[in-house]
Amino acid sequence: MMSRDRSGPAICQQILIYPVTDATMSFPSIQANAKGYLLTQEMMHWFLNHYRRPETDLKDPYLSPYWAEDHSQLPPAYIATAGYDPLHDEGEAYAQKLRDAGVPVVYRSFQNMVHVFFQLPKLLKECRELEDDIAKALQTAFSAKVLL
């Protein structure tokens, strides 16, 4: 988004793996998956408080891209979420915001997974599937040679 708004650098693909897109933490999965699935709501608050300046508006689009007024002219996106993750709903909602703005999106929800599943390729076939998806998305993006 900042790249678009500031005319560069050119980015050809977004790869978002269980992304944080709403610092207000207002989506239902924040509460529904608040405890018991490795990443907790308490941890999310800790990360946020160490990531942003205290005076930063939680709906600032560079902190919370979900809340941006304009999602158009962003690079194509591959977005993956985990079903048992506090971030699930905001990742899904962000994918829809991008689609609604005409951005090409591939969205995949790994329903039975927790937030860290991508770090376990030797144990989980879903992780290997996600690796394959990312490789395909990048291959497509790099072969297109069109940068936004």
Image (cartoon, rainbow, N blue to C red):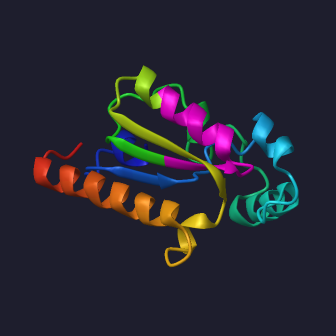
| Residue at (17, 56) in percent of width and height | 142
| Residue at (72, 51) in percent of width and height | 84
- Relative to 75, 140 lies left or right: left
Whether residue 134 is situated above or below residue 104 in the rendered picture: below
- Relative to 106, 97 lies left or right: right
| Magenta range | 80-97
**Residue 24, quarter of picture:** top right
Could you say where residue 11 lies in the image, as x and y percent from the top left? 28, 52
Is 48 colored magenta in this rendering? no
Residue nearer the viewer, 8 or 29: 29
Could you say where residue 63 lies in the image, as x and y percent from the top left? 61, 48
| Residue at (60, 65) in percent of width and height | 117
Q: How many marks?
A: 0
| Residue at (44, 20) in percent of width and height | 100
Residue nearer the viewer, 87 or 148: 87
- Relative to 129, 56 lies left or right: right
